[in-house]
Every structure is written in structure tokens, then in C-alpha cells.
Amino acid sequence: MEGDSDTYSGLGNGEIDSKVVQTFQKSFVQVQNILDQNRLLINEINQNHESKIPHNLTRNVGLIRELNNNIRRVVDLYGDLSSSFTKSVDASSEGDSSSGAAMKSDGKTGHKRNRPA
């Protein structure tokens, strides 16, 4: 099928370093595992709440703390992913000399415009 090799053609020379892809995949797997764990925590919290048993309600305090920590971890992982993606795009753009003009991080070329006097 035509275009398969250009899946990431918007990034530099059309390729992404396999190490970058592996990092993304690893992070997404971590996020998915945490979200799966959160689903279980939420189910247990709900069951404890519905039971109205004092011990279960007290246990919810720790479960909710764990849930909050997991959410912070997900936010951090997504932040790291965003930063890694930005760095890989910037590095890819710097390595692409086919455009004839260097791209700055703001997406503008380094050319000066000559204005008539």
C-alpha cells in the first residue's frame, strides 16, 4: 500500500527514531496499566461506600489517596510524552536540510523578508 513508509512524513525526513517510538509505546502501556488499576480502585471505593460499613469507609481514605497519586502519575507521564514528542519533532526538523531554510521552534523560517524602501 502506497504511503506506508510515510506514516510520519510530517516529521523531518519521514522517519521517527525507533527509540522514540519505543519510549512512546512504553509510556502508553504504563498509562493504560494505571488507568486499569484506577478502574479497579473506583469499583472498590464504590462498593465500600455502598456498604456503609465503618471499616470499609475508613479504607476508602487510603484508596482515594492511591487514586489521586495514580492520576498525578498519568499527568506526569503525559507531560513527559509531550516533552519527548516536541524534542523529537524539533530534532527531526533540524536534521531536515531539504527545505532550504531552517525552521525555528515557532514554526517560522529563518529567512528575512526584504521590504522595499
Image (cartoon, grey):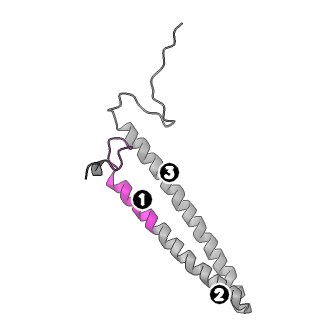
Amino acid residing under circle 3? Ser
Residue occupied by mark 2: 47
The span from disc 3 to disc 2 (Cα, nearest Å) is: 38 Å
Helix or strand or loop: what does disc 1 sit on?
helix
Residue 26 appears in which quarter of the rendering?
Answer: bottom left
The span from disc 1 to disc 3 (Cα, nearest Å) is: 11 Å
* Foreground of the two, 115 or 67: 115
Which residue occupies 67% across, 87% down? 48
Question: Which tag, 1 or 3, sits closer to the chain's start?
Answer: 1
Left or right: residue 108 compared with residue 43: left
Q: Which mark is residue 24?
A: 1
Q: Residue furthest top?
A: 117
Q: How many marks?
A: 3
- Marks 3/2 in contact by CB < 8 Å: the verdict is no
- Return the x and y of residue 111 as percentages of the image width and height: 45, 23
- Marks 1/3 in contact by CB < 8 Å: the verdict is no
* Foreground of the two, 108 or 59: 108
Helix or strand or loop: what does disc 2 sit on?
helix
Question: Which tag, 3 or 2, sits closer to the chain's start?
Answer: 2
Residue 40 appears in which quarter of the rendering?
Answer: bottom right
- Return the x and y of residue 75 as percentages of the image width and height: 57, 61
Which residue occupies 35% across, 28% down? 100
Q: Is residue 15 magenta?
A: yes
Which residue occupies 47% across, 34% down? 104
Amino acid residing under circle 2? Gln
- Return the x and y of residue 44 as percentages of the image width and height: 61, 84
Q: Residues within 10 Å of mark 3 (few under 14, many from 20)?
A: few
Q: Residues within 10 Å of mark 1 (few under 14, many from 20)?
A: some
Amino acid residing under circle 1? Phe
Location of the C terminus by quadrant is top right
Q: Residue furthest front?
A: 1
Residue occupied by mark 3: 83
